[in-house]
Amino acid sequence: MRDSEMPAPYDRVLGTALRNARIEASFGLGELGRWLGVDPALLSSWELGQRMPTLEDVAGVLGALGVVGEKKARIMALARELAGSSWVMRGSQADTAHYAMVAGHERTAESVTVWAPLQIPELLQIPDYARLVFGPGLRDKEILEQVVENRLSRNEILFGAEAVEAQLFVGTEALRNHLGDAEVMLRQVRYLMEVSQTVKIRLVPSPAVSEDAFSRYRQRDETEVVYCPHHRAGVFLVGRQAAPYAGTIERLAESALSRTDSLHSLSAAAAGFAEEVKTQRLANEAGLTRLLAGEDPAG
Protein backbone atom coordinates (compact mmCIF):
# COMPACT_ATOMS: atom_id res chain seq x y z
CA MET A 1 0.00 0.00 0.00
CA ARG A 2 1.33 3.43 -0.97
CA ASP A 3 -1.43 5.87 0.04
CA SER A 4 0.98 8.76 0.59
CA GLU A 5 2.89 8.23 -2.63
CA MET A 6 2.13 9.03 -6.25
CA PRO A 7 1.18 5.84 -8.09
CA ALA A 8 3.92 4.40 -10.28
CA PRO A 9 3.28 4.39 -14.05
CA TYR A 10 2.78 0.60 -14.19
CA ASP A 11 0.32 0.79 -11.30
CA ARG A 12 -1.70 3.31 -13.29
CA VAL A 13 -1.60 1.05 -16.35
CA LEU A 14 -3.10 -1.85 -14.39
CA GLY A 15 -5.65 0.42 -12.73
CA THR A 16 -6.69 1.86 -16.08
CA ALA A 17 -7.06 -1.63 -17.55
CA LEU A 18 -9.32 -2.67 -14.68
CA ARG A 19 -11.38 0.51 -14.96
CA ASN A 20 -11.81 0.12 -18.73
CA ALA A 21 -12.86 -3.50 -18.28
CA ARG A 22 -15.46 -2.44 -15.70
CA ILE A 23 -16.86 0.32 -17.89
CA GLU A 24 -17.02 -1.96 -20.94
CA ALA A 25 -18.96 -4.48 -18.86
CA SER A 26 -21.37 -1.69 -17.79
CA PHE A 27 -20.65 -2.15 -14.10
CA GLY A 28 -20.60 0.69 -11.58
CA LEU A 29 -18.18 0.61 -8.66
CA GLY A 30 -21.02 -0.03 -6.22
CA GLU A 31 -22.46 -2.91 -8.24
CA LEU A 32 -19.06 -4.56 -8.71
CA GLY A 33 -18.30 -4.11 -5.03
CA ARG A 34 -21.53 -5.93 -4.12
CA TRP A 35 -20.68 -8.78 -6.50
CA LEU A 36 -17.23 -9.20 -4.96
CA GLY A 37 -18.02 -8.28 -1.38
CA VAL A 38 -15.40 -5.52 -1.60
CA ASP A 39 -15.66 -1.88 -0.51
CA PRO A 40 -16.19 0.29 -3.65
CA ALA A 41 -13.62 2.72 -2.22
CA LEU A 42 -11.00 -0.03 -2.33
CA LEU A 43 -11.97 -0.84 -5.94
CA SER A 44 -11.53 2.83 -6.78
CA SER A 45 -8.08 2.91 -5.17
CA TRP A 46 -7.06 -0.04 -7.35
CA GLU A 47 -8.26 1.71 -10.49
CA LEU A 48 -6.43 4.92 -9.53
CA GLY A 49 -3.20 3.04 -8.85
CA GLN A 50 -3.20 4.12 -5.21
CA ARG A 51 -3.19 0.54 -3.96
CA MET A 52 -2.04 -2.70 -5.57
CA PRO A 53 -4.58 -5.52 -5.79
CA THR A 54 -3.31 -9.05 -5.30
CA LEU A 55 -3.33 -11.51 -8.20
CA GLU A 56 -6.36 -13.16 -6.60
CA ASP A 57 -8.12 -9.77 -6.45
CA VAL A 58 -7.44 -9.09 -10.13
CA ALA A 59 -8.66 -12.55 -11.12
CA GLY A 60 -11.80 -12.02 -9.05
CA VAL A 61 -12.56 -8.67 -10.70
CA LEU A 62 -12.06 -10.08 -14.19
CA GLY A 63 -14.22 -13.10 -13.37
CA ALA A 64 -17.06 -10.91 -12.09
CA LEU A 65 -16.84 -8.72 -15.19
CA GLY A 66 -16.83 -11.71 -17.53
CA VAL A 67 -13.46 -10.85 -19.04
CA VAL A 68 -11.97 -13.84 -20.87
CA GLY A 69 -9.51 -14.78 -23.60
CA GLU A 70 -6.67 -12.59 -24.77
CA LYS A 71 -7.84 -9.58 -22.80
CA LYS A 72 -7.87 -11.51 -19.53
CA ALA A 73 -4.46 -13.03 -20.30
CA ARG A 74 -3.01 -9.55 -20.98
CA ILE A 75 -4.33 -8.01 -17.76
CA MET A 76 -3.28 -11.02 -15.66
CA ALA A 77 0.19 -10.95 -17.21
CA LEU A 78 0.48 -7.27 -16.29
CA ALA A 79 -0.70 -7.98 -12.73
CA ARG A 80 1.86 -10.78 -12.35
CA GLU A 81 4.63 -8.55 -13.63
CA LEU A 82 3.71 -5.84 -11.14
CA ALA A 83 3.43 -8.31 -8.30
CA GLY A 84 6.85 -9.73 -9.13
CA SER A 85 7.54 -13.09 -10.68
CA SER A 86 6.64 -15.10 -7.61
CA TRP A 87 4.46 -15.20 -4.57
CA VAL A 88 4.43 -17.27 -1.41
CA MET A 89 1.58 -19.11 0.29
CA ARG A 90 2.34 -19.47 3.99
CA GLY A 91 1.60 -22.69 5.85
CA SER A 92 1.23 -26.22 4.53
CA GLN A 93 -1.47 -27.62 2.27
CA ALA A 94 -3.42 -28.36 5.44
CA ASP A 95 -4.27 -24.64 5.31
CA THR A 96 -7.40 -24.00 3.25
CA ALA A 97 -6.01 -21.05 1.27
CA HIS A 98 -2.83 -22.94 0.36
CA TYR A 99 -4.76 -26.01 -0.74
CA ALA A 100 -7.21 -23.91 -2.76
CA MET A 101 -4.39 -22.14 -4.60
CA VAL A 102 -2.73 -25.43 -5.61
CA ALA A 103 -6.01 -27.09 -6.59
CA GLY A 104 -7.07 -24.01 -8.54
CA HIS A 105 -3.94 -24.06 -10.69
CA GLU A 106 -4.43 -27.77 -11.37
CA ARG A 107 -8.07 -27.32 -12.41
CA THR A 108 -7.22 -24.55 -14.89
CA ALA A 109 -4.17 -26.28 -16.37
CA GLU A 110 -3.96 -27.79 -19.83
CA SER A 111 -0.98 -29.91 -18.83
CA VAL A 112 0.88 -30.77 -15.64
CA THR A 113 4.44 -31.95 -15.07
CA VAL A 114 5.45 -33.19 -11.62
CA TRP A 115 8.86 -34.00 -10.17
CA ALA A 116 8.69 -35.89 -6.84
CA PRO A 117 12.20 -36.90 -5.75
CA LEU A 118 11.53 -38.06 -2.17
CA GLN A 119 7.81 -38.82 -1.82
CA ILE A 120 5.10 -40.34 -3.98
CA PRO A 121 3.52 -37.49 -6.01
CA GLU A 122 0.57 -35.90 -4.23
CA LEU A 123 -1.74 -36.63 -7.17
CA LEU A 124 -1.01 -40.37 -6.87
CA GLN A 125 -1.08 -40.90 -3.11
CA ILE A 126 -3.42 -43.49 -1.62
CA PRO A 127 -5.33 -42.44 1.53
CA ASP A 128 -3.12 -44.28 4.04
CA TYR A 129 0.05 -42.92 2.47
CA ALA A 130 -1.35 -39.37 2.66
CA ARG A 131 -2.25 -39.98 6.33
CA LEU A 132 1.34 -40.99 7.06
CA VAL A 133 2.64 -37.87 5.30
CA PHE A 134 0.35 -35.44 7.17
CA GLY A 135 -0.08 -37.40 10.41
CA PRO A 136 3.00 -36.17 12.32
CA GLY A 137 1.89 -32.54 11.96
CA LEU A 138 -1.87 -33.01 12.40
CA ARG A 139 -3.01 -34.50 15.69
CA ASP A 140 -6.67 -33.62 15.15
CA LYS A 141 -8.12 -36.70 13.42
CA GLU A 142 -11.08 -34.82 11.94
CA ILE A 143 -8.82 -32.19 10.36
CA LEU A 144 -6.45 -34.89 9.13
CA GLU A 145 -9.28 -36.73 7.37
CA GLN A 146 -10.46 -33.52 5.70
CA VAL A 147 -6.93 -32.77 4.50
CA VAL A 148 -6.57 -36.30 3.13
CA GLU A 149 -9.94 -36.02 1.39
CA ASN A 150 -8.89 -32.70 -0.16
CA ARG A 151 -5.67 -34.22 -1.44
CA LEU A 152 -7.41 -37.21 -2.96
CA SER A 153 -10.03 -35.03 -4.68
CA ARG A 154 -7.26 -33.40 -6.69
CA ASN A 155 -6.55 -36.57 -8.68
CA GLU A 156 -9.64 -35.83 -10.78
CA ILE A 157 -7.33 -33.92 -13.10
CA LEU A 158 -5.68 -37.27 -13.89
CA PHE A 159 -8.70 -39.58 -13.97
CA GLY A 160 -11.79 -37.37 -14.30
CA ALA A 161 -13.91 -36.75 -17.36
CA GLU A 162 -11.73 -33.79 -18.35
CA ALA A 163 -8.34 -35.26 -17.46
CA VAL A 164 -5.37 -33.10 -18.42
CA GLU A 165 -2.17 -34.18 -20.09
CA ALA A 166 0.23 -35.13 -17.31
CA GLN A 167 3.67 -36.59 -16.86
CA LEU A 168 4.95 -37.54 -13.44
CA PHE A 169 8.62 -38.13 -12.68
CA VAL A 170 9.24 -40.06 -9.46
CA GLY A 171 12.66 -40.34 -7.83
CA THR A 172 13.74 -43.87 -6.95
CA GLU A 173 14.37 -42.59 -3.42
CA ALA A 174 10.59 -42.13 -3.06
CA LEU A 175 10.22 -45.92 -3.25
CA ARG A 176 12.10 -46.44 0.01
CA ASN A 177 10.16 -47.02 3.23
CA HIS A 178 10.73 -43.56 4.70
CA LEU A 179 7.41 -43.63 6.56
CA GLY A 180 8.08 -46.92 8.34
CA ASP A 181 5.05 -48.89 7.15
CA ALA A 182 5.90 -51.58 4.61
CA GLU A 183 2.26 -52.62 4.17
CA VAL A 184 1.19 -49.10 3.19
CA MET A 185 4.18 -48.82 0.86
CA LEU A 186 3.25 -52.13 -0.75
CA ARG A 187 -0.29 -50.95 -1.48
CA GLN A 188 0.98 -47.57 -2.66
CA VAL A 189 3.46 -49.06 -5.12
CA ARG A 190 0.88 -51.52 -6.42
CA TYR A 191 -1.44 -48.57 -7.01
CA LEU A 192 1.29 -46.84 -9.03
CA MET A 193 1.66 -50.00 -11.10
CA GLU A 194 -2.10 -50.07 -11.72
CA VAL A 195 -2.47 -46.45 -12.82
CA SER A 196 0.74 -46.46 -14.86
CA GLN A 197 -1.32 -48.06 -17.62
CA THR A 198 -3.08 -44.73 -18.17
CA VAL A 199 -0.85 -42.11 -16.52
CA LYS A 200 2.69 -41.33 -17.66
CA ILE A 201 4.83 -42.34 -14.70
CA ARG A 202 8.59 -42.57 -15.14
CA LEU A 203 11.17 -43.30 -12.47
CA VAL A 204 14.31 -41.19 -12.24
CA PRO A 205 17.46 -42.45 -10.49
CA SER A 206 17.61 -40.10 -7.51
CA PRO A 207 21.20 -38.85 -8.00
CA ALA A 208 20.45 -37.88 -11.61
CA VAL A 209 18.56 -34.63 -10.89
CA SER A 210 19.21 -32.62 -7.74
CA GLU A 211 16.29 -30.20 -8.18
CA ASP A 212 13.79 -30.19 -5.30
CA ALA A 213 10.17 -31.19 -5.85
CA PHE A 214 8.02 -29.01 -8.10
CA SER A 215 4.93 -29.02 -10.31
CA ARG A 216 4.63 -27.04 -13.52
CA TYR A 217 1.18 -26.03 -14.74
CA ARG A 218 0.72 -24.89 -18.32
CA GLN A 219 -2.39 -22.75 -18.03
CA ARG A 220 -5.15 -22.34 -20.60
CA ASP A 221 -4.10 -18.73 -21.16
CA GLU A 222 -0.65 -20.10 -22.20
CA THR A 223 1.12 -18.86 -19.08
CA GLU A 224 3.24 -21.30 -17.07
CA VAL A 225 3.27 -21.48 -13.29
CA VAL A 226 5.74 -23.52 -11.26
CA TYR A 227 4.80 -24.55 -7.73
CA CYS A 228 7.57 -25.47 -5.29
CA PRO A 229 6.28 -27.01 -2.04
CA HIS A 230 8.19 -26.54 1.20
CA HIS A 231 7.53 -27.68 4.75
CA ARG A 232 5.66 -24.58 5.91
CA ALA A 233 5.12 -22.65 2.69
CA GLY A 234 4.69 -22.97 -1.05
CA VAL A 235 6.29 -20.76 -3.70
CA PHE A 236 4.60 -20.01 -7.04
CA LEU A 237 6.87 -18.86 -9.86
CA VAL A 238 5.90 -17.30 -13.18
CA GLY A 239 7.63 -15.55 -16.05
CA ARG A 240 11.41 -15.43 -15.97
CA GLN A 241 11.62 -17.27 -12.66
CA ALA A 242 9.63 -20.21 -14.00
CA ALA A 243 11.50 -20.40 -17.33
CA PRO A 244 14.57 -22.40 -16.09
CA TYR A 245 12.32 -25.31 -15.12
CA ALA A 246 11.85 -26.17 -18.79
CA GLY A 247 15.53 -27.20 -18.82
CA THR A 248 15.07 -29.21 -15.63
CA ILE A 249 12.17 -31.09 -17.19
CA GLU A 250 14.34 -31.88 -20.21
CA ARG A 251 17.01 -33.33 -17.89
CA LEU A 252 14.38 -35.37 -16.10
CA ALA A 253 13.12 -36.78 -19.39
CA GLU A 254 16.68 -37.66 -20.45
CA SER A 255 17.53 -39.32 -17.13
CA ALA A 256 14.24 -41.15 -16.56
CA LEU A 257 13.68 -44.81 -17.21
CA SER A 258 11.26 -45.71 -19.97
CA ARG A 259 7.68 -46.37 -18.91
CA THR A 260 8.26 -50.11 -19.41
CA ASP A 261 11.47 -50.13 -17.34
CA SER A 262 9.75 -47.95 -14.72
CA LEU A 263 6.98 -50.53 -14.42
CA HIS A 264 9.57 -53.29 -13.96
CA SER A 265 11.27 -51.26 -11.21
CA LEU A 266 7.93 -50.67 -9.49
CA SER A 267 7.26 -54.40 -9.65
CA ALA A 268 10.64 -55.11 -8.03
CA ALA A 269 9.95 -52.55 -5.31
CA ALA A 270 6.54 -54.13 -4.65
CA ALA A 271 8.15 -57.56 -4.34
CA GLY A 272 10.62 -56.17 -1.81
CA PHE A 273 7.85 -54.64 0.28
CA ALA A 274 5.82 -57.87 0.06
CA GLU A 275 8.78 -59.79 1.45
CA GLU A 276 9.21 -57.20 4.20
CA VAL A 277 5.53 -57.49 5.14
CA LYS A 278 5.76 -61.30 5.17
CA THR A 279 8.83 -61.22 7.40
CA GLN A 280 7.16 -58.82 9.82
CA ARG A 281 4.00 -60.93 10.00
CA LEU A 282 6.00 -64.07 10.71
CA ALA A 283 7.87 -62.23 13.46
CA ASN A 284 4.59 -61.01 14.95
CA GLU A 285 3.11 -64.49 14.86
CA ALA A 286 6.20 -65.97 16.52
CA GLY A 287 6.06 -63.31 19.21
CA LEU A 288 2.36 -64.01 19.81
CA THR A 289 3.04 -67.75 20.08
CA ARG A 290 5.75 -67.15 22.70
CA LEU A 291 3.44 -64.80 24.59
CA LEU A 292 0.65 -67.38 24.68
CA ALA A 293 3.15 -69.97 25.87
CA GLY A 294 4.13 -67.70 28.73
CA GLU A 295 7.54 -66.86 27.26
CA ASP A 296 9.14 -63.46 26.77
CA PRO A 297 7.93 -62.25 23.31
CA ALA A 298 11.23 -60.41 22.77
CA GLY A 299 13.21 -63.51 23.46
Image: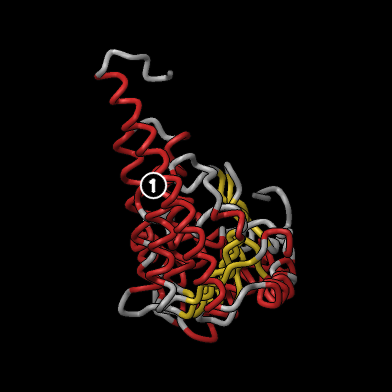
Do we see residue 100 in this rendering?
yes
Q: Depth check: 238 or 187 in front?
A: 187
Q: Where is residue 211 in the image (x, y as percent from the top left)?
A: 71, 60
Q: Depth check: 293 or 153 in front?
A: 293
Taking the spot 35% from the left edge, 73% from the top edge, the residue there is: 159
Q: Which amino acid does label 1 sit on?
A: Glu
Do we see residue 19 in this rendering?
no
Q: Where is residue 26 in the image (x, y as percent from the top left)?
A: 39, 79
Looking at the rendered structure, the secondary structure element under dot 1 is helix
Residue bearing mark 1: 183
Q: In which quarter of the image is residue 292?
A: top left
Q: Quadrant of residue 225?
A: bottom right
Pick the quarter of the image with the C terminus.
top left
Q: Quadrant of residue 126?
A: bottom left
Taking the spot 55% from the left edge, 50% from the top edge, the residue there is: 176
Q: Depth check: 293 or 241 in front?
A: 293
